[in-house]
Image (cartoon, rainbow, N blue to C red):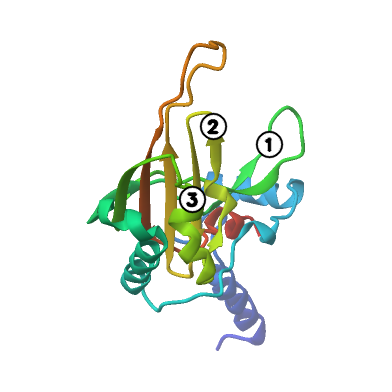
Amino acid sequence: MRGPLFLIVLSVVVLAGCQQRPGRRPPGVDASAEASGRGAARDTLPFDESEIVKPKVQYGSFHVAADSARALVDRSLGAWAGGAVWRKERVVFEYRDSIQVMGSGGERPMWVLGSRPSEPVTGLTMSLDVALDGFEGELTVLGGLRAAGWVEDAQYAADGPDGSMLALVSEEAICRYAASWNGGDEGDSTSASASGMSIRLECVPRFPIRRGELVRSQ
């Protein structure tokens, strides 16, 4: 007959066997990502939630949001609406909705919203070529969206001498406006800028912010 000491030793062995072996991780968790995440959590500045735009206007689905955007833009264009060409097509879109670590030059790293690889998505596009006379650019194209509660996401804004870009968002969609024109040569006083503008509007699905790396670091 085995005594109490044997039972105690047996219990310790069983419990030790149930513990996770050193170095083993759940499926799908990369060791290097886990290690870098832990370091990032200690050494990086906290993520600023104000970078995430939180629009109040909601449509329930991307398709409803896109159809509503088209109606609002056509109404805003007024007399120019007849020249707008709308298409439902696949769009290669660069999303800026991934939380990543940024740091260089010895500065303390910080969490920021960054780009993830471009991917083709089902979207709604609009193309329009207009003369500049009497046309107020994005104010004319996007005025209806703004009035309906769509808000600007600064992650997609850019300006230059030959064009500009910005995006308005609802809960379910991103409508990115891009305008281009011939700005002329600033160094040549005889260079004249063209009087026309080409506009492209891309409406694509909007997804939740991707927090993968941030979550793994905590």
Apparent side of residue 184 relative to residue 99 in the rendered image (left or right):
left
First of labels 1, 3 by sequence position: 1
Spatial CA distance of label 2 from label 3 is 15 Å
Residue at label 1?
103
Q: Does residue 31 appear anywhere in the picture?
A: yes
Residue kind at label 3, given as amino acid type:
Glu
Q: Residue at x 54, y 40 (%)?
A: 158
Q: Residue at the spot x=56%, y=69% of the render?
A: 55
Q: Residues within 10 Å of mark 3 (few under 14, many from 20)?
A: some
Q: Nearer the viewer, mark 2 or mark 1?
A: 2
Q: Nearer the viewer, residue 77 or 171?
A: 77
Considering the numbered disc 3 on the image, is that residue within a helix, a strand or a loop?
A: helix
> At numbered mark 1, what does the secondary structure look like: helix, strand or loop?
loop
Residue 148 is situated, as x and y percent measured from the top left of the image, at 50, 72
Crowding at mark 1 (Cα within 10 Å: few <14, some 14-19, many 20+): few
Residue 125 image position (x, y, % from top left): 30, 53
Residue depicted at 36% across the width and 52% down the height: 202
Question: Identity of the amino acid at label 2?
Answer: Gly
User: Is 39 displayed left or right of 96 in the figure?
Assistant: right
